[in-house]
Amino acid sequence: MSQSEKDEILHDHNHDGIDRRGFLKCMAWAGTGALCVMQGGVLKSYSMSRANEWNAAKMAGELSFAQISDSHMGFNKAANPDVAATLKAAVDKINALSVQPEFLLHTGDISHLARPEEFDTVDQILKGAVAKDVFFVPGEHDVIGDEGKQYRDRYGKGAVGEGWYSFEKKGVHFIGLVNVVNLKAGGLGNLGGEQLEWLEADVKHLKASTPIVVFAHIPLWSVYPEWGWGTDDSAQALSYLKKFGSVSVLNGHIHQIMQKVEGNVTFHTAASTAFPQPQPGKADSPGPMKVPAEQLRSLLGITDVNFVRGQHALAIVDSQLG
Amino acid sequence: MRGKFARIGLASVVVALLSMFAAAGRVGGAAAQDKVAATAEVKIDNFSFGPTALTVPVGTTVTWTNRDDIPHTVVSTDGVFKSKALDTDDKFSFVFTKAGTYPYFCSIHPKMTGTVVVQ
């Protein structure tokens, strides 16, 4: 197998489920990063280590946005004593892109302990982004102690219920979901009946050809339920999206890059801007992974997403901070 | 006049207090020791409560200590007790004054569950 083949992950459109082996195959580490292009339901993923071979024209689109995740402002342990610096580095990297993304998506765990000063610091750093609009969804760390009241006061204007919402950008329908409140003992992430009803109504009027981007903190697919890396009622949410030809699901939470395709849906998790977490089952717990300082930035990252009109494809580029 | 009364009053209180201390010293020692001993610890390590199931006598103070690099909470499934976010090395204590079974979990990592049985 050539290096080029090794770096390219091809998923079959008809691949319905995913076994453990297939799942591991679908994993790409932030350290190697990945560019993903979805065309006609088939996802191609290219390693960022080969970015110099990319065809820039092919990657250009009418809409691009950058995803950042899990900034965990306030975390100060050995795995990364300066999470503000790495978030700043992520913003610098986005600002350096040749085509500026229209907006940023933050897929949660903005703060580490939901302290006001942690949110303030993130807001201040994100003001340094050229792209002025930032769309958020909460992570479980953002709702500690008050089930998300402070989060909604800060970021939930115009949102519904616990903070979910949708918006349109250039023909793409974006849906921000909340799956970190009212969690049940022994359970996983949770969307809840009220949000599911809202989602069903939200997409009902849309044409099947509308590209859909769903973003939420905890993965909406079963990455590793043993570590709580999944959402109990995500299958019902996805059932409302079956009619659409192109659905992309962006999540954070697991601090590493993974992707898979299931029918019309591409699932993608982003790296953290703060600290990496171990591969599923490869450690005693999903706690922060301590890596040598010189390696840290290669395991943190941002995700740049391009939407190409007409092809209904989303190209997802993961780049490391180092 | 008023001052004299006050002095007498104060003296009476001092005598009464001394008598109480003396009594405690003679007969209260063993009972007091039992009460002091009624504590138990739960450690949070690697996203789990240890011990997962803890059995204690009524009146026990249970103290949870988070030894992970990630914050956790200790929340009673039935709403009996609820900690704030426990950062690394933070502690939360609760006194169990009634017999019963108390299931609890970490509200931000709900896969983490434990039980305190009080009897």
Image (cartoon, coloured by chain):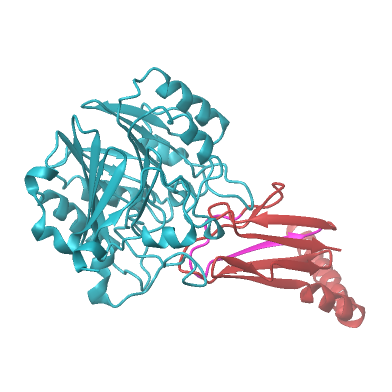
Chain colours: A cyan, B red
Quarter occupied by the C terminus of chain A: bottom left
Please check the rendered image and state whether residue A112 is part of the magenta-colored stretch, yes or no: no
- The answer to which quarter of the image holds residue A190 is top right
Q: Is residue A182 left or right of residue A72?
A: right
Residue at the far right in the pictured view: B27
- The answer to whether residue A87 shows anywhere in this view is no
Quarter occupied by the N terminus of chain A: bottom left
Q: Position of residue B102 (x, y in %)?
A: 75, 56
Residue at the far top in the pictured view: A205
User: Which range is magenta?
Assistant: B83-97
Going 51% across and 30% down the picture, which residue do you hit? Answer: A196
Going 32% across and 34% down the picture, which residue do you hit? Answer: A246
Main secondary structure type of the part rendered in magenta:
loop
B38 or A178, nearer to the observer: A178
Q: Is residue A39 left or right of residue A157?
A: left
Going 28% across and 50% down the picture, which residue do you hit? Answer: A122
- The answer to whether residue A53 shows anywhere in this view is yes
Q: Position of residue B65 (x, y in %)?
A: 59, 69
In the depicted structure, whether residue A300 falls above or below residue A222: below
- The answer to which quarter of the image holds residue A131 is top left
Q: Is residue A27 left or right of residue A160?
A: left
Count of numbered badges drawn on the protein: 0
A228 or A267, nearer to the observer: A267
Going 72% across and 55% down the picture, which residue do you hit? Answer: B103
Q: Position of residue B81 (x, y in %)?
A: 68, 52
